[in-house]
Amino acid sequence: MLFFKIFAIIIYKYFLIKILMNVLLEKLLLNNLLNDKDRYEIRQIFNFVDDKKKLNILNNFENIINKVLKIKSELKDQQEILL
């Protein structure tokens, strides 16, 4: 019986951590200058990576977003040059 209680606590903590990571991601996404498409794509990537990579994404979120915005700006500039 004790084994099942411990197992239930471990499972509970595991899913609680997953929920908290998703909530933190949503909070970070809403506080940045991203459009809906970018938010959707980041969510998709986040859902497919393992927990270690999720933590890395959350810890380095500002750097990642800055890189994404920089690349988008460069692409826009290149597109304007071509037109």
Image: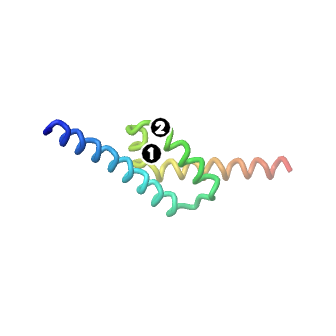
Q: Is residue 17 left or right of residue 58?
A: left
In three-dimensional space, the C-alpha distance between marks 1 and 2, rounded to whole angstroms, equals: 10 Å
Q: Is residue 30 left or right of residue 72?
A: left
Q: Nearer the viewer, mark 1 or mark 2?
A: 2
- Out of 15 and 37, give the one closest to the viewer: 15
Residue extending furthest toward the front? 1
- Which amino acid type is shown beneath numbered disc 2? Val
Q: Quadrant of the N terminus?
A: top left
At 81% from the left and 49% from the top, the residue drawn is 81
- The secondary element bearing badge 2 is classed as loop
- Residue 69: x and y in percent read 60, 53
Up/down of 41 relative to 24, above or below: above
Residue drawn at x 28%, y 47% is: 12
Instruction: Identify which amino acid the numbered label 1 is placed on.
Output: Ile
Q: Residue furthest left?
A: 2
* Of the image marks 1 and 2, the number of the one nearer the N terminus: 2
Residue 25 locus on image (x, y percent): 45, 54
Q: Nearer the viewer, residue 45 or 2?
A: 2
Decide if residue 47 is on the left or right side of residue 5: right
Position of residue 83 measured from the top left corner of the image (x, y, whole percent): 86, 50
Q: Residue furthest bottom?
A: 31
Per the image, the residue denoted by label 1 is 57
The answer to whether the residues at label 1 and label 2 have Cβ atoms under 8 Å apart is: yes
Residue at position x 32%, y 50% from top?
Answer: 16
